Image: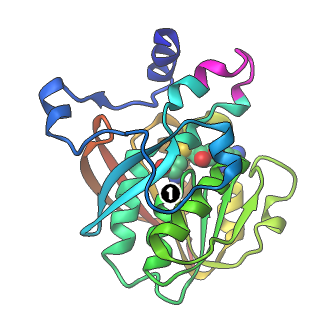
Amino acid sequence: MRSRQAARKRRGLWGRPLSAPERRAEAPAKTAVYGAAAPPDRLAARYRLGRTPVQVGGRSWSMLGPADPDSLIDAIQPNDDDRLPYWAQLWPAGQVLAEAVLTTDALAGQRVLELGCGLGLTAAAALVAGAELLAVDCEPDALAFAAYNVQALAGVSLVTKLGNWRGPDPGAWLEPPYDIVLAADVLYERRDVEPLAALVPQLLAPGGWLWLAEPRREAGGRFVALLREAGWDDVVQSVPFAGLGQRLVVDLHRLTPPG
Ligand SMILES: C[S@@+](CC[C@H](N)C(=O)[O-])C[C@H]1O[C@@H](n2cnc3c(N)ncnc32)[C@H](O)[C@@H]1O
Protein backbone atom coordinates (compact mmCIF):
# COMPACT_ATOMS: atom_id res chain seq x y z
CA MET A 1 0.00 0.00 0.00
CA ARG A 2 2.75 2.42 0.98
CA SER A 3 4.66 1.83 -2.23
CA ARG A 4 1.47 2.35 -4.24
CA GLN A 5 0.82 5.62 -2.48
CA ALA A 6 4.44 6.64 -3.03
CA ALA A 7 4.04 5.76 -6.71
CA ARG A 8 0.90 7.85 -6.93
CA LYS A 9 2.69 10.74 -5.26
CA ARG A 10 5.49 10.43 -7.82
CA ARG A 11 2.88 10.47 -10.56
CA GLY A 12 1.54 13.66 -9.05
CA LEU A 13 -1.88 12.26 -8.22
CA TRP A 14 -2.08 13.74 -4.76
CA GLY A 15 -1.97 17.28 -3.48
CA ARG A 16 -0.57 18.02 -0.03
CA PRO A 17 -2.24 15.66 2.45
CA LEU A 18 -4.34 17.33 5.13
CA SER A 19 -2.87 17.48 8.63
CA ALA A 20 -4.72 15.56 11.39
CA PRO A 21 -6.52 18.70 12.72
CA GLU A 22 -7.51 19.62 9.17
CA ARG A 23 -8.87 16.12 8.61
CA ARG A 24 -10.91 16.33 11.81
CA ALA A 25 -12.32 19.68 10.66
CA GLU A 26 -13.53 18.11 7.43
CA ALA A 27 -16.92 16.55 6.88
CA PRO A 28 -16.97 12.92 8.11
CA ALA A 29 -14.92 10.62 5.90
CA LYS A 30 -16.26 7.73 3.89
CA THR A 31 -18.33 5.23 5.81
CA ALA A 32 -19.56 1.82 4.73
CA VAL A 33 -23.29 2.45 5.25
CA TYR A 34 -25.88 2.61 2.51
CA GLY A 35 -28.48 5.28 1.92
CA ALA A 36 -32.14 4.53 1.41
CA ALA A 37 -31.94 3.54 -2.25
CA ALA A 38 -30.33 0.17 -2.92
CA PRO A 39 -27.27 0.14 -5.22
CA PRO A 40 -27.27 -2.27 -8.16
CA ASP A 41 -26.71 -5.89 -7.09
CA ARG A 42 -23.73 -6.22 -9.43
CA LEU A 43 -21.87 -3.41 -7.66
CA ALA A 44 -22.84 -4.63 -4.20
CA ALA A 45 -21.57 -8.09 -5.13
CA ARG A 46 -18.24 -6.82 -6.44
CA TYR A 47 -17.37 -4.13 -3.90
CA ARG A 48 -17.64 -3.23 -0.26
CA LEU A 49 -19.57 -0.01 -0.72
CA GLY A 50 -19.03 3.31 1.01
CA ARG A 51 -20.34 6.83 0.81
CA THR A 52 -18.42 10.08 0.55
CA PRO A 53 -20.24 13.23 1.69
CA VAL A 54 -19.67 16.34 -0.44
CA GLN A 55 -20.89 19.91 -0.16
CA VAL A 56 -21.46 21.30 -3.62
CA GLY A 57 -23.48 24.25 -4.91
CA GLY A 58 -25.06 24.67 -1.47
CA ARG A 59 -26.19 21.04 -1.49
CA SER A 60 -25.15 18.16 0.78
CA TRP A 61 -24.64 15.18 -1.46
CA SER A 62 -23.52 11.67 -0.68
CA MET A 63 -21.69 9.74 -3.39
CA LEU A 64 -21.67 5.96 -3.50
CA GLY A 65 -18.45 4.20 -4.46
CA PRO A 66 -16.07 1.46 -3.42
CA ALA A 67 -15.33 1.88 0.30
CA ASP A 68 -11.60 1.33 -0.11
CA PRO A 69 -10.23 2.52 -3.48
CA ASP A 70 -6.64 1.90 -2.35
CA SER A 71 -7.36 -1.82 -2.03
CA LEU A 72 -8.43 -1.85 -5.69
CA ILE A 73 -5.09 -0.33 -6.64
CA ASP A 74 -3.29 -2.94 -4.58
CA ALA A 75 -5.25 -5.69 -6.33
CA ILE A 76 -4.23 -4.83 -9.89
CA GLN A 77 -1.29 -6.46 -11.66
CA PRO A 78 1.95 -4.46 -11.45
CA ASN A 79 2.11 -3.91 -15.22
CA ASP A 80 -1.58 -3.24 -15.72
CA ASP A 81 -1.19 0.51 -15.68
CA ASP A 82 -4.06 0.89 -18.13
CA ARG A 83 -6.51 -0.29 -15.47
CA LEU A 84 -5.47 1.88 -12.53
CA PRO A 85 -8.84 2.38 -10.83
CA TYR A 86 -8.74 6.15 -10.40
CA TRP A 87 -12.47 6.18 -11.20
CA ALA A 88 -13.20 4.66 -7.80
CA GLN A 89 -12.90 7.80 -5.69
CA LEU A 90 -13.84 11.47 -5.87
CA TRP A 91 -11.19 13.98 -6.89
CA PRO A 92 -10.90 17.66 -5.94
CA ALA A 93 -11.05 18.77 -9.57
CA GLY A 94 -14.38 17.00 -10.01
CA GLN A 95 -15.81 18.75 -6.98
CA VAL A 96 -14.53 22.15 -8.19
CA LEU A 97 -16.04 21.55 -11.63
CA ALA A 98 -19.36 20.42 -10.10
CA GLU A 99 -19.43 23.60 -8.01
CA ALA A 100 -18.79 25.74 -11.10
CA VAL A 101 -21.51 23.92 -13.03
CA LEU A 102 -24.08 24.36 -10.26
CA THR A 103 -23.41 28.07 -9.79
CA THR A 104 -24.09 29.16 -13.36
CA ASP A 105 -26.96 28.81 -15.80
CA ALA A 106 -24.52 28.32 -18.70
CA LEU A 107 -25.34 24.61 -19.07
CA ALA A 108 -29.13 24.87 -19.16
CA GLY A 109 -30.43 23.37 -22.40
CA GLN A 110 -26.91 22.85 -23.76
CA ARG A 111 -25.55 19.69 -25.36
CA VAL A 112 -22.78 18.66 -22.98
CA LEU A 113 -20.20 15.85 -22.96
CA GLU A 114 -18.26 14.80 -19.87
CA LEU A 115 -14.97 13.02 -20.48
CA GLY A 116 -13.89 10.67 -17.64
CA CYS A 117 -16.94 10.98 -15.39
CA GLY A 118 -15.69 8.63 -12.63
CA LEU A 119 -18.33 8.26 -9.90
CA GLY A 120 -20.55 10.91 -11.48
CA LEU A 121 -20.32 13.99 -9.26
CA THR A 122 -19.84 16.47 -12.11
CA ALA A 123 -22.38 14.59 -14.22
CA ALA A 124 -25.01 14.89 -11.48
CA ALA A 125 -24.27 18.61 -11.20
CA ALA A 126 -24.55 19.08 -14.98
CA LEU A 127 -27.94 17.35 -15.08
CA VAL A 128 -29.26 19.37 -12.14
CA ALA A 129 -28.06 22.46 -14.04
CA GLY A 130 -30.25 21.46 -16.99
CA ALA A 131 -27.67 20.05 -19.41
CA GLU A 132 -28.41 17.43 -22.04
CA LEU A 133 -25.51 15.20 -21.04
CA LEU A 134 -23.49 12.28 -22.35
CA ALA A 135 -21.03 10.90 -19.78
CA VAL A 136 -18.04 8.87 -20.96
CA ASP A 137 -15.54 6.67 -19.17
CA CYS A 138 -13.38 3.69 -20.08
CA GLU A 139 -14.37 1.74 -16.96
CA PRO A 140 -17.77 -0.01 -16.93
CA ASP A 141 -18.01 0.07 -13.14
CA ALA A 142 -17.38 3.82 -13.12
CA LEU A 143 -20.37 4.27 -15.42
CA ALA A 144 -22.50 1.96 -13.24
CA PHE A 145 -21.69 3.92 -10.08
CA ALA A 146 -22.16 7.22 -11.93
CA ALA A 147 -25.58 6.13 -13.18
CA TYR A 148 -26.60 5.14 -9.66
CA ASN A 149 -25.35 8.41 -8.14
CA VAL A 150 -26.95 10.55 -10.84
CA GLN A 151 -30.31 8.83 -10.41
CA ALA A 152 -30.12 9.28 -6.64
CA LEU A 153 -28.98 12.91 -6.74
CA ALA A 154 -30.47 14.40 -9.91
CA GLY A 155 -33.47 12.07 -10.25
CA VAL A 156 -32.77 11.29 -13.90
CA SER A 157 -31.17 8.51 -15.92
CA LEU A 158 -27.60 9.07 -17.02
CA VAL A 159 -26.80 8.56 -20.69
CA THR A 160 -23.36 6.94 -20.87
CA LYS A 161 -20.83 5.64 -23.34
CA LEU A 162 -18.08 3.20 -22.50
CA GLY A 163 -14.93 3.94 -24.45
CA ASN A 164 -11.29 4.94 -24.47
CA TRP A 165 -10.38 8.24 -26.10
CA ARG A 166 -6.97 6.80 -26.98
CA GLY A 167 -8.72 4.17 -29.13
CA PRO A 168 -9.50 4.44 -32.85
CA ASP A 169 -11.59 7.36 -34.09
CA PRO A 170 -13.00 8.67 -30.78
CA GLY A 171 -14.28 11.73 -32.66
CA ALA A 172 -16.89 9.42 -34.25
CA TRP A 173 -18.22 7.39 -31.29
CA LEU A 174 -18.38 10.45 -29.06
CA GLU A 175 -21.07 11.86 -31.39
CA PRO A 176 -20.13 15.53 -31.60
CA PRO A 177 -20.83 18.43 -31.75
CA TYR A 178 -21.20 19.68 -28.15
CA ASP A 179 -21.76 23.16 -26.80
CA ILE A 180 -19.67 22.36 -23.72
CA VAL A 181 -17.19 19.59 -22.96
CA LEU A 182 -16.50 19.01 -19.26
CA ALA A 183 -13.40 17.25 -17.97
CA ALA A 184 -12.06 17.01 -14.41
CA ASP A 185 -8.63 15.56 -13.67
CA VAL A 186 -8.33 13.46 -16.80
CA LEU A 187 -4.78 14.56 -17.73
CA TYR A 188 -2.49 12.65 -15.38
CA GLU A 189 -0.81 10.52 -18.06
CA ARG A 190 1.51 12.10 -20.62
CA ARG A 191 0.21 9.68 -23.26
CA ASP A 192 -3.24 11.33 -23.04
CA VAL A 193 -2.00 14.81 -23.91
CA GLU A 194 -1.72 14.58 -27.70
CA PRO A 195 -4.80 12.35 -28.23
CA LEU A 196 -6.98 14.69 -26.20
CA ALA A 197 -5.50 17.82 -27.79
CA ALA A 198 -6.35 16.33 -31.19
CA LEU A 199 -9.80 15.15 -30.10
CA VAL A 200 -11.26 18.15 -28.28
CA PRO A 201 -11.40 20.46 -31.35
CA GLN A 202 -13.45 17.77 -33.13
CA LEU A 203 -15.96 17.67 -30.31
CA LEU A 204 -16.99 21.30 -30.04
CA ALA A 205 -19.71 23.11 -31.95
CA PRO A 206 -18.79 26.57 -33.25
CA GLY A 207 -18.59 28.85 -30.22
CA GLY A 208 -18.24 25.81 -27.94
CA TRP A 209 -16.24 25.57 -24.70
CA LEU A 210 -14.01 23.12 -22.94
CA TRP A 211 -14.33 23.45 -19.17
CA LEU A 212 -11.26 21.68 -17.81
CA ALA A 213 -10.66 21.36 -14.07
CA GLU A 214 -6.98 20.67 -13.60
CA PRO A 215 -5.10 20.17 -10.31
CA ARG A 216 -1.85 21.45 -11.84
CA ARG A 217 -0.49 18.15 -13.04
CA GLU A 218 2.37 18.20 -15.51
CA ALA A 219 0.36 16.49 -18.26
CA GLY A 220 -2.50 18.94 -17.75
CA GLY A 221 -0.11 21.86 -18.13
CA ARG A 222 1.26 20.42 -21.38
CA PHE A 223 -2.27 19.95 -22.73
CA VAL A 224 -3.29 23.53 -21.92
CA ALA A 225 -0.03 24.83 -23.41
CA LEU A 226 -0.74 22.94 -26.66
CA LEU A 227 -4.21 24.47 -26.97
CA ARG A 228 -2.92 27.95 -26.20
CA GLU A 229 -0.21 27.56 -28.84
CA ALA A 230 -2.97 26.60 -31.28
CA GLY A 231 -4.67 29.92 -30.56
CA TRP A 232 -7.30 28.86 -28.00
CA ASP A 233 -8.52 31.50 -25.60
CA ASP A 234 -8.12 30.41 -21.97
CA VAL A 235 -9.91 32.07 -19.05
CA VAL A 236 -8.47 30.54 -15.87
CA GLN A 237 -9.89 30.65 -12.38
CA SER A 238 -7.62 29.27 -9.64
CA VAL A 239 -9.66 27.66 -6.88
CA PRO A 240 -8.05 26.75 -3.51
CA PHE A 241 -9.51 23.42 -2.37
CA ALA A 242 -9.42 21.61 0.95
CA GLY A 243 -11.35 18.37 1.28
CA LEU A 244 -11.38 14.71 0.22
CA GLY A 245 -8.22 14.39 2.30
CA GLN A 246 -6.27 16.90 0.21
CA ARG A 247 -5.35 20.57 0.10
CA LEU A 248 -4.38 21.98 -3.30
CA VAL A 249 -5.28 24.49 -5.99
CA VAL A 250 -7.45 23.47 -8.91
CA ASP A 251 -7.26 25.56 -12.07
CA LEU A 252 -10.60 25.83 -13.82
CA HIS A 253 -9.89 26.55 -17.50
CA ARG A 254 -12.63 27.76 -19.81
CA LEU A 255 -11.10 27.22 -23.23
CA THR A 256 -12.50 28.27 -26.59
CA PRO A 257 -10.98 27.48 -29.99
CA PRO A 258 -9.81 30.23 -32.33
CA GLY A 259 -12.18 31.77 -34.88
C1 LIG B 1 -8.74 10.88 -11.85
S1 LIG B 1 -10.27 10.22 -12.40
C2 LIG B 1 -11.35 11.64 -12.33
C3 LIG B 1 -12.79 11.23 -12.21
C4 LIG B 1 -13.78 12.40 -12.08
N1 LIG B 1 -13.73 13.24 -13.26
C5 LIG B 1 -13.49 13.19 -10.84
O1 LIG B 1 -12.94 14.30 -10.96
O2 LIG B 1 -13.81 12.72 -9.73
C6 LIG B 1 -10.06 10.05 -14.19
C7 LIG B 1 -11.25 9.39 -14.89
O3 LIG B 1 -11.02 9.38 -16.30
C8 LIG B 1 -11.22 8.06 -16.80
N2 LIG B 1 -10.26 7.88 -17.91
C9 LIG B 1 -8.92 7.95 -17.83
N3 LIG B 1 -8.35 7.73 -19.02
C10 LIG B 1 -9.38 7.51 -19.88
C11 LIG B 1 -9.44 7.23 -21.29
N4 LIG B 1 -8.31 7.11 -22.01
N5 LIG B 1 -10.66 7.08 -21.88
C12 LIG B 1 -11.79 7.19 -21.12
N6 LIG B 1 -11.80 7.45 -19.79
C13 LIG B 1 -10.61 7.61 -19.18
C14 LIG B 1 -10.91 7.14 -15.61
O4 LIG B 1 -11.51 5.86 -15.74
C15 LIG B 1 -11.46 7.96 -14.45
O5 LIG B 1 -12.84 7.73 -14.23
- In this view, the residue farthest toward the right is 168
Please, is residue 82 above or below residue 89 in the view? Answer: above
23 in the magenta segment? no
Pointer 1 residue Cβ closer than 8 Å to ligand 1:
no
How many numbered marks are there?
A: 1
Q: Between 50 and 137, which is closer to the camera in this rendering?
A: 50
Q: Secondary structure at mark 1?
A: helix
The magenta span reads 73-81
- Which x, y percent locates residue 164? 76, 49
Which quadrant is the C terminus positioned in? Answer: bottom right
- Which x, y percent locates residue 123? 52, 66
The amino acid type, in three-letter code, at marker 1 is Arg
Residue ID at (38%, 39%): 31
Q: Quadrant of residue 16?
A: top left
Q: Between 51 and 175, which is closer to the camera in this rendering?
A: 51
- In this view, the residue farthest toward the top is 3
